[in-house]
Amino acid sequence: MPARRAQSGIALVTAVMIVAIAAAIAVQIAFAHQIWFRQMENVADRDATDWLRRGALHWASLALLEDAAQNSTDHLGESWAMGLPTLPVEGGTIKVSIEDAQSRFNLNSIGGTDPTSLANLQLLQRLLDVLQLDPQLANAVADWIDPNSDARAGGAEDIDYLNLNPPYRAANRPMASVDELRLIRGFDAKTVAALLPYVTVLPAVTNDINVNTASPVVLDGGNGREDRFFPGCARHFDRAPRAPQRSAASTLAQQDHDCDLAQAATPDRRRAATLERIG
């Protein structure tokens, strides 16, 4: 009798172990299947977002080509600047807008030592001052871009960045993205957020600001912009007493060659925001 009870106990323990192992395998299979299913959903969402992005780029290209054929003065009253309303798409919405990249200050215009670059540097310092930020941050940006290793007042070079944890070097080349500001000494998240709406990085080292699309902050803090469009720079100079001082630092223009396409898509569970340069 005791032996028979022992065998029954062993059989019960074995059955419980088999059930536990089978349950664990079933849970693992279900979890793996859930991961695979979510991955497939993400792939489908990414493909849908990519096609929406292509459609937005196609619309933007047509809008800019049509505008270029009609006139050579770019301003915020044109159809390209009004963007598209939020449009419903399968599983979400999409909103597309075009922004004149030359309505912002080009950070790559301050990396040289020529008079124009130095004047642009002073313009960036004034922009920082208008935003109540440290004007010396402009020197840190210039040091990040210029090819030499000589630190300016308030700037930083390799020797400063190599002492950080983790260490890295200054780029010593034109910036590829405004996100590089986060790597430059003195630029914390709050500072970058305050400056970001007013700056851009363009391949050209010039700083041709379009007075018809630039914000009042970029146009030297508070001069504002009248409810009309400037066919030439002279009328802007007549209205803004300090504009002739700015002209040494940047060329004021009415025709732009670089535009940013902003797209915000929300297919299914995700929100995807993309920014494309058209120029």
Image (cartoon, grey):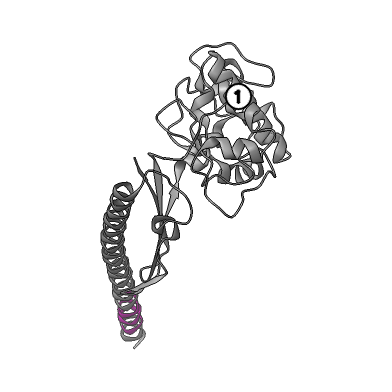
Q: Is residue 183 left or right of residue 255?
A: right
- The span shown in magenta is 8-17
Q: Residues within 10 Å of mark 1 (few under 14, many from 20)?
A: many
Q: Secondary structure at mark 1?
A: helix
**On the rendered image, what quadrant is the N terminus found in?**
bottom left
Relative to 129, is 66 above or below?
A: below
Determine the main secondary structure of the stretch shown in magenta.
helix
From this viewpoint, which residue is outermost toward the bottom? 1
Residue 225 at what x, y percent from top left?
Answer: 61, 48
Q: Which residue is mark 1?
A: 121
Residue 224 at what x, y percent from top left?
Answer: 65, 47
| Nearer to me, 228 or 189 | 228
Residue at figure coordinates x 61%, y 41% from the top left: 195
Which quadrant of the figure has residue 40? bottom left
Residue 14 at what x, y percent from top left?
Answer: 31, 76
| Nearer to me, 247 or 30 | 247
Q: Is residue 239 left or right of residue 267?
A: right
Relative to 98, is 35 above or below?
A: below
Residue at figure coordinates x 63%, y 28% from the top left: 244
Relative to 172, is 255 above or below?
A: below
Can residue 185 be spotted in the picture?
no
Can residue 184 be spotted in the picture?
yes
User: Amino acid type of disc 1?
Assistant: Leu
**On the rendered image, what quadrant is the C terminus found in?**
top left
Is 271 colored magenta in this rendering? no
Q: Is residue 73 left or right of residue 140?
A: left
Residue at figure coordinates x 50%, y 26% from the top left: 109
Is 14 colored magenta in this rendering? yes
